[in-house]
Amino acid sequence: MKELSKTNRLTIVVSAIVLVFIVGLLTLRKPDVQYNQSPEGMLTALADTANYLLPSQLKRIVEANDGKSVLIDVRNSIAYGQNHIGEAKNIPVRELFTPENLKFLRTAEKNNQQIILYGESPQQANGAWMMLKQTGFSHAVMVNSSFGALNRPASDSIPVDMCMLRDEPRIDTAALSKLRNPAPAAEKPVVKAAPKKTVLPAPVQHSSGGGC
Amino acid sequence: MNKRYLILAIIAVAIGAGILLLPENPRDRELSPADLLNAIDDPSRFLSTDLITDRLVKKDPSLLLIDVRPEAQFKMFAIPGAINIPLDSLLTPSSQAALENKELDKVFYSNSDVMADQAWISAKRAGFEAIFVMKGGVNTWFNTIVNAAEPSETEPSQAFALYHFRKGACQYFFGTGETAAPVTEAPKKPVSLTPRPVQSSSGGGC
């Protein structure tokens, strides 16, 4: 009898521990947002030019307005309130993963809509875009331009700064070569001075001409 | 009864030893998406070109400049002292060894901001610490240091101090330009040129 009660006690303890584990596992809250792309996969996506929209492409999409895409303005709400492009929705970078924004973005993803992000600068749009791309929004693209360049009136003929759009080197190679090999510039007067001496024999020509 | 306790104890010790021997998962250091978003929203990762230049001139040993542009652009022009880790090979084992060093401030730069920031976000997600981005990239660096604009006379003295610092830094990186070596080439040409006019003139004369 004594033996039996001890066995019972042990069974109760063991089953209680198992119960705690099960309850713990069941109540473990999965985070709302999880990565679904590996870091290496993201690096490949970064090199894919299809993920970057040019201002001209964005203009075409905004004009078409066929419901195949949603436009997201990632600037702060004050800047958005002053002006924004088309029917863009304002989601500042820091509010990207709030429940209602996630719901909106997931609906768009489910409907196979392209999520287009633009910001004050391409760098600002890039942060939000990379977050979406890494967390399962495969249709997210960013506009590789600044809001200032996108928002210019059509009559403005000043060309957009292409360098900023494509992240290209803009180095004054002439200034650089002058710095690296400054000698040719300093030496030129020397070369000019030398022929002056050779010009001096020219009177020989003159005198010989007179001789004949 | 004692035997049963013993068996339970042995099982517990075996599980503990098993956990101890589990291989370390490199993903364990990974920042959660929510933390990464907060980090992205924080602009303190951006360092100015003047600050970087100052640290380069002072030969700060704790600074590691990383050029994330493709190798061809790196070879064409790079900031003196920078190493090249192209963006697509950022997470290879050899590159990670460079990022692993906790003593160094790793500063990414590209032509402008976007690529360097992409490298920063990727490295931040992988859990690397002490990483920064040089604001404006190599284009801004070149235009402020090499092509430093002289301030007008009405500007405050700080503007002049900054201008002289930039000019000095430029001389530090690229020299003042007074080298004597190429002058030795120059006299050769005039020497070979001089006989010709004399020859022709004498021929025509007589």
Image (spheres, coloured by chain):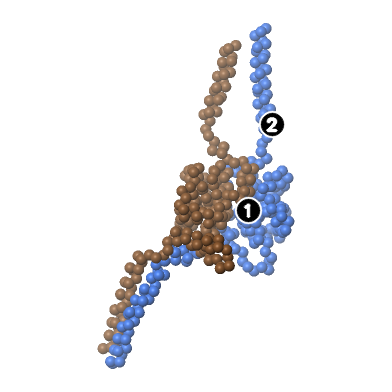
Tell me, yes or no, if residue B71 can be seen here: no
Residue B167: where, in percent of width, then height?
48, 62
Tell me, yes or no, if residue B168 can be seen here: yes
Residue A115: where, in percent of width, then height?
67, 51
Q: Eyeballing the image, is B17 above or below B161?
A: above
Q: Mark 1 points at which residue?
A: A124
Query: A185 or A112, which is in the foreground?
Result: A185
- From the image, state the color of chain A: blue
In the image, farthest residue toward the top: A1
Residue A137: where, in percent of width, then height?
65, 47
Q: Which of marks 1 and 2 is in front?
A: 1
Q: Mark 2 points at which residue?
A: A27
**Residue shown at 53% from the left, 28% from the top:** B20
- From the image, state the color of chain B: brown
Question: Total label count?
Answer: 2
User: Which chain hosts label 1?
Assistant: A
Earlier-in-chain disc, 1 versus 2? 2
**Residue shown at 34% from the left, 76% from the top:** A194
Image position of A201 (left or right of B20): left
Image position of B50 (left or right of A194): right
Task: Name which residue type carries label 1.
Answer: Gln
Task: Name which residue type carries label 2.
Answer: Thr
Question: What secondary structure is found at the residue carrying circle 1?
Answer: helix
Query: B94 or A65, which is in the foreground?
Result: B94
Marks 1 and 2 on same chain: yes
Query: A9 or B41, which is in the foreground?
Result: B41
Quarter placement of the N terminus of chain B: top right
